Image: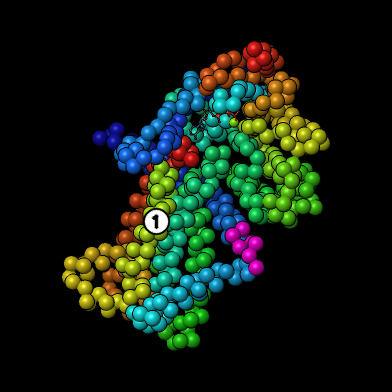
Amino acid sequence: MSALLTQSRSRLARTSTYFRSLWSRREFAWYLAMGNLKARNASTALGLLWWVINPLLLGLVYYLVFGVIFESSRDLSYLLSGMFVFHFTSQAMTGGANSILQNSRLLANIKFPRLILPIANLIEAGVGFLASLVVLYAVAIPSGSADLNIHFLLILLIIPIHLFFNLGLSALTARLAVPFRDINNILPYINRLWLYLSPIIWPIEFMDRMSEPIQRVMLLNPMWSIVGVYRAALLGDPLEPGLLATSALIALGVGLFGIGTFIKYESRIVRHL
Amino acid sequence: MSRPAILVDNVSVRFRPYVDRKPTVRRSLARLRHRETTEVNALTDVSFSVTPGEAFGVIGRNGAGKSTLLRVLAGTLRPDDGKAVTNGTTSTLLQLGVGFNPELSGRRNVYLGGLAGGMRKADIESRFDDIVTYAGLEEAIERPVKTYSTGMFSRLAFSVGMALEPEILLLDEILSVGDESFRGKSMQAMRDLLDRSGTIVFVSHSLASVAQFCDRALWLEHGRVKQIGPAEEVVEAYQKAASK
Ligand SMILES: Nc1ncnc2c1ncn2[C@@H]1O[C@H](COP(=O)(O)OP(=O)(O)OP(=O)(O)O)[C@@H](O)[C@H]1O
Ligand SMILES: [Mg+2]
């Protein structure tokens, strides 16, 4: 009993040391992310403008296909809000895998809490996400579909929830990609499937046409609640009861699981690079 | 006697790299369950200690395990057996320019490299001018680092590495570049470090500089300690064996 207590206490101590050293390295994470952001577009003619153009083009492509041709989602701001939220998560996943694989020199030479790399990747993708929110408002406000009300304050809750969720997934793919490079080949398909299974390119009303068991499975999709809360915050949609709590619980679970798995594995990373 | 700066006790490192044979469907399927691996004994039962103020050389043929040993000392590679303890802030100039992003300017890379090495942004800011002057790159500091010559790159990286003011410096084969004046400057910087009772572990294929610069040296062969002793003796023995 007391042995168990000592053991869990020493684990707690180790964890808190880890997060303290992570915190002391925050400037490094920030510079890494900003450096990558700058480097990415440094040699293109439009430079930083790409941060706004990319989501705009992405949204237009999907609007053309699903709004105009298939007429499955007429509402552009409904489509864009879902797309941008989902895109952030999918970027976190693909970027997380690459953040470890592409920094092998850094990992082999310098000792630091490895979680810095998925975090830097998250910061990088997060900047893109913020830029895409600007685009969203540029579309939604003139068309009158952004109903700015008290619900907007939800954004202060859902962004941290979303971030923690993304960090968990990003850490998980990073951990898996080290021994199984195959992840990089599979990830695009997983992301595509996930997108089609989420209420993004089709309207919520589609649900009514699905059979009961399928409906129940669909509600397990974390994107369901996360996107739902975002829509309430950004577009003033009604907030279904329980949606916020569900998203928070899912994010907590996924986040803790992903981060935990990653930290447990990180001392072995260098051997596999 | 003061406590050692570096204590390596029976360290062994084994790698299990995947074997790249001709892929067949059968092998691919088998690999899903159990990957084919060989075992490489990169280090076997290595023990030694280094005292503060000492310059310690490591020599040996390609693949002898020198870089692996430095990674263990830097703390990035956990040994399979034994342990390695360092007392002091370790700067890992294992390789030059770690953390640099070639697309970005020299200025930005000074920050990146410094932060990667564990400095705070405020410290880098206050030492920035010294770093650049020391590297002699005032003119080129706003240019992307990918436009630098090899020597310019190394000078900047070395300057940043020294600005970390390490107590233990791990150098893996990095002083072969740079022109004459900079080589003299970097040797001086390393002597200063030793005078402040810092410690240097120096991996090099340049036997002359090991013999001249280091107090003691370690000769690794196939991951095992072949000889440890005064640098000149070890280098001499190594040379004799190599010429045979
Ligand atoms: N990540 C790794 N996976 C598998 N094997 C590795 C790995 N890193 C090193 N090795 C092997 O360990 C052995 C020692 O390598 P190491 O890089 O330490 O040699 P070295 O003495 O630094 O050689 P050099 O003088 O060429 O730099 C080599 O056989 C090498 O192939
Ligand atoms: Mg080497």
Q: Residue furthest left?
A: A212
A252 in relation to B169, above or below: below
Quarter that holds the N terminus of chain B: top right
Q: Secondary structure at mark 1?
A: helix
Sort mark 1 into few (<14), some (14-19) or many (20+) by Cα contacts within 10 Å: some
Q: Is residue A67 left or right of residue A33?
A: left
Percent position of residue B15, x then y: 45, 30
Q: Residue under circle 1? A: A187
The residue positioned 57% from the left and 53% from the top of the image is A32
Q: Which residues are magenta?
A: A39-45
**Ligand 2 sits in quadrant:** top right
Q: Is mark 1 within 8 Å of ligand 1?
A: no
Percent position of residue A205, x then y: 27, 79
Percent position of residue B185, x then y: 78, 35
The residue positioned 43% from the left and 66% from the top of the image is A87
The subunit letter for the residue under badge 1 reads A
According to the image, what is the colour scheme of the structure? rainbow
Q: Amino acid at mark 1?
A: Leu
Quarter that holds the C terminus of chain B: top right
